[in-house]
Image: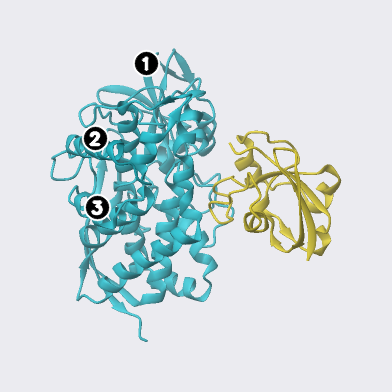
Amino acid sequence: MAKVTFITEDGNSHLIEDAEGSLMDIAVDNGIEGIEGDCGGVGSCATCHVRVKQEWMEKVGKAEELEQDILEFEDGTCSRSRLCCQIDVDEDLDGLVVEVAKLG
Amino acid sequence: MSKCPYHDPFKEAREKGPVLETEFDGDPVAMLVDFKAVRKACRDPKTFSSDAPFRIPIPREEDVRTVRQYPFEVDPPEHADYRAIVEPLFRRPTTPEYIEKMEDLVDELVRDAAGRDSIEIVREFAIPLQSKGLTLLLNMPMSEADIWIKWGTHVFRDESGVSKGHEMEAYTNSLFDKAEANPGEDFFSHLTKAEYRGRKLTREEMQGYANIAFAGGRDTVINAISMVVAYVAEHPEALDAMRENPKLIISGTEELMRYASPVTHLGRHCPVDTDVHGTKVKADHLISLNWAAANFDPKIFKDPEEVKLDRKPNPHVAFGNGIHNCLGAAHARLTIRTLLKKLCELTSSIELVDFHRKKEVEAHYTRENAFHTLNVKMAPATP
């Protein structure tokens, strides 16, 4: 279990206390605005685009090449962009903060 | 099926470069066949516009409909406001209530199929499933599907050669009349009540929404259903793997959509002379975004001609990409996921009896991604 915070487009923070598993599933289960996860987590739909807070980048890691290709043409992509279906939350990521990108 | 010589008819073209110079309706069309080129073009609606009624689907559709399709054939910024009117309705397939209704529907159809000696999947399974499924999306009584089932696989271009396009327009127009007189909670009533930038929609706009709601998700969903049944009939190990690990139903749905790519390609209009990766496209001419070719691009998909149910990441563009991505995608995904789930649960074997493939024959390619007929024998699961 870990705590993760989503900062949605409207600037509000949403703290999830008991997060575990796919960050996309966590967002969808908690109704986080801007994360839809339509494809169920295989990176087809790019509806789970987040930007990881800089201080967490080292632990979460950058997007791999194929994920970067997916993100390349999305709106609001930067070097901290990830598809959250590709991030697995465990205790190492306790305290993680991500910003939810605008749906393209 | 994976050995089908036509499965990736764009391989040679893709190796030569991102553009296949081809032609449709007697005009040159610059067809993009490279994944990145397709995705990039999706994101540039100024250069590659959708504001070209009847010409976004290729070949053009003036002969089969009289209305611009909304929000499909509209550019930004108006597009976002037109799309917002219907987006909430098309998000409903992710709700538990909707999922349960879809499960009940597919359950009934698979039980019926497995109870017969054999079944012709296209006409006796895929068309009823698509039509009845659409009543959920449009929030109509399921009995209404009886009318739609008679339209055949493709409202506009069924193999009978008779377009049902004008019949469909008269039908949807009568539904808007009824909805205006006595509004309910269905798709048609929603449109009669909707406002676009502070005014009511015109009847022509309403007809444009209805037109694509019926035409856009018809042959595509029917062909996807048939392809999925054919695939699992030829690959019983795929259903076994999904029974063992139900998560594969989710990723497998995406992979089978990539593999089937029900819409081969769609057009975009160049308002001015445009250089498209070295190909000169004249003003008022078209490019094509070839989803099927992009989905087999080996630079993105390792072993593209292999179905890998656990492929991840799988950035396929079977539902398009960018602002015009398929509005019905959530419904289509649910349809295929539920189909796979029920085939796992309710059948013990599916045997391919015979089939007759449908060919999409164009100037520079022939593609086979659909069936005229597909006969299978399904055995019910042993209790």
Q: Which chain is cyan?
A: B
Height in image: B379 above or below A83? below
Confirm or deny contact between disc 3 and disc 2 (CB under 8 A). no
Q: Residue at x 35, y 85 (%)?
A: B382
Q: Where is residue A57 shown, x and y percent of the image?
A: 81, 47
Residue situated in front as seen by the camera: B19 or B210: B210
Q: Residue at x 34, y 25 (%)?
A: B202
Q: Position of residue A80 (x, y in %)?
A: 76, 41
**Residue with the mark numbered 1:** B284
Residue occupied by mark 2: B173
Instruction: Tell which circle, 2 or 1, labels the residue nearer the N-terminal end.
Output: 2
> Quick one: SS at disc 3?
helix
| Residue type marked 3 | Glu
Q: Is residue B285 visible?
A: yes
Q: Chain of mark 3?
A: B
Disc 2 versus disc 1: distance between alpha carbons?
31 Å
Q: Gap between marks 3 and 2, in whole Å?
A: 15 Å
The chain assigned the colour yellow in the figure is A
For mark 3, what is the residue? B144
Q: Earlier in the sequence, mark 3 or mark 2?
A: 3
* B130 and B248: which is toward the camera: B130
Q: What amino acid is labelled 2 in the image?
A: Asn
Q: Residue furthest bottom?
A: B383
Say if labels 3 and 1 share a chain: yes
Above or below B44: residue B175 = below
Horizontal side of B20 relative to B250 (left or right) equals left
